[in-house]
Amino acid sequence: MASRLQRPVWRDALRKNGVDDALAEKICQDISDRYPPWEESSFPGLLGNVIAGRIANRFDLRGTNCITDAACASSLSALSMSINELVSHQSDLVITGASTR
């Protein structure tokens, strides 16, 4: 989905190679049309927080849901956040998970 952000680069490269504005725009549109459409089902792979929200919604967990990105320390950061929720009595129960890519 992020590839669409390159559209100005495509257009600039086409113009610098002698393609007129109208044709450059048509080519850019043709390239863009080949990508999947922006819709609700497109976002889980692009935005991690959507995945957390869908899991919480599917299991009717209520409460806060989030993801944490701390590079190599993400699992430790998630665990720390969970412990803080319990210690501060902001939550009675937490579900914490981690994965590696």
Image (cartoon, rainbow, N blue to C red):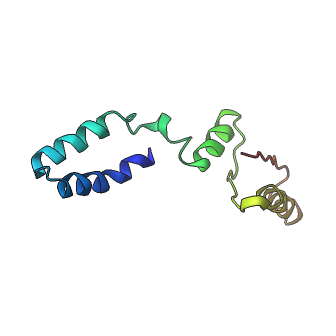
Which image quadrant is residue 27 in?
Answer: top left
Task: Give me the residue at 22% from left, 51% from top.
Answer: 14
Q: Horizontally, is 13 left or right of 79 in the view? A: left
Task: Give me the residue at 29% from left, 35% from top.
Answer: 33
Residue 38 drawn at (x, y percent):
39, 39
Against 82, residue 50 (above or below) is: above
Against 82, residue 35 (above or below) is: above
Task: Give me the residue at 68% from left, 41% from top.
Answer: 56
Which of these two is toward me, 84 or 26? Answer: 26
Q: Horizontally, is 82 left or right of 18 in the view? A: right
Q: Horizontally, is 13 left or right of 98 in the view? A: left
Against 93, residue 12 (above or below) is: below
Which of these two is toward me, 13 or 84? Answer: 13
Residue 3 drawn at (x, y percent):
41, 47
Residue 9 drawn at (x, y percent):
31, 56
Which image quadrant: the N terminus?
Answer: top left
Which image quadrant is residue 15 in?
Answer: bottom left
Residue 90 drawn at (x, y percent):
79, 61
Which of these two is toward me, 54 or 25? Answer: 25
Task: Give me the residue at 10% from left, 51% from top.
Answer: 20
